[in-house]
Image (spheres, rainbow, N blue to C red):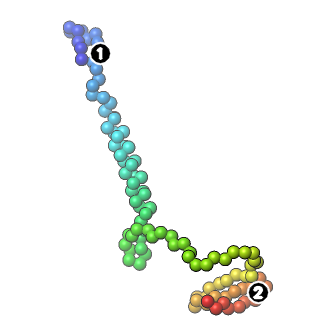
Amino acid sequence: MRRTGLNRHAGLDDEAGDPLDGLVNLFDIGMVLAVAFLVAGLGLTRDPDSGRVEPRSPVATPSGPTASGRGQAVGTVYQLPDGRLVLVQPNGQRSPIDP
């Protein structure tokens, strides 16, 4: 800061900085926290039986034998309320399926 006599010929240096700089930094911190909470929330799930929040379990992949080849559709399989499976063929014929 420099002053010449009583007249101010030279400007004052602005050493205080911009007062909104701190607000911008708070906004950045808020955005980082919001993303962190989003990522943490997506990794959790609520158990419908107990109501507790638990970590999400990984999706199980089938480990049994796989089939490949060519074939044709033979009908649609339905499960009845008592647990039995029924095959309905395109011609309307129904046959039970033994599990």
Q: Position of residue 7 (x, y in %)?
A: 24, 9
Decide: is 16 above or below 24: above
Per the model, the C-alpha gap separating discs 2 and 1 is 95 Å
Q: Is residue 69 above or below residue 27?
A: below
Q: Taking 86 as reference, is 65 above or below it? A: above
Sequence-first tag of 2 and 1: 1
Question: Is 24 left or right of 71, judged from the image as shown?
Answer: left
Instruction: Please tell me whether mark 2 sits on a helix, a strand or a loop.
Output: loop
Residue for point 76% across, 86% down: 92
Residue 70 point in image, percent of width and height:
75, 75
Question: Identity of the amino acid at label 1?
Answer: Gly
- Residue at the right extreme? 91
Label 2 amino acid?
Answer: Gly
Q: Which mark is residue 1?
A: none
- The x, y position of residue 29, in whole percent, is 35, 46
Indicate the quadrant where residue 81 lies. Answer: bottom right
From the viewer's perspective, is 74 left or right of 52?
right
Quarter of the figure with the N terminus: top left
Tell me: residue 65, above or below residue 95. above
Q: Are marks 2 and 1 in contact (CB under 8 Å)?
A: no
Badge 1: how crowded within 10 Å, few (<14), some, or many (20+)? few
Could you say which quadrant of the image residue 48 lies in? bottom left
Q: Is 60 on the left or on the right of 99, as rendered?
A: left
Which mark identifies residue 92? 2
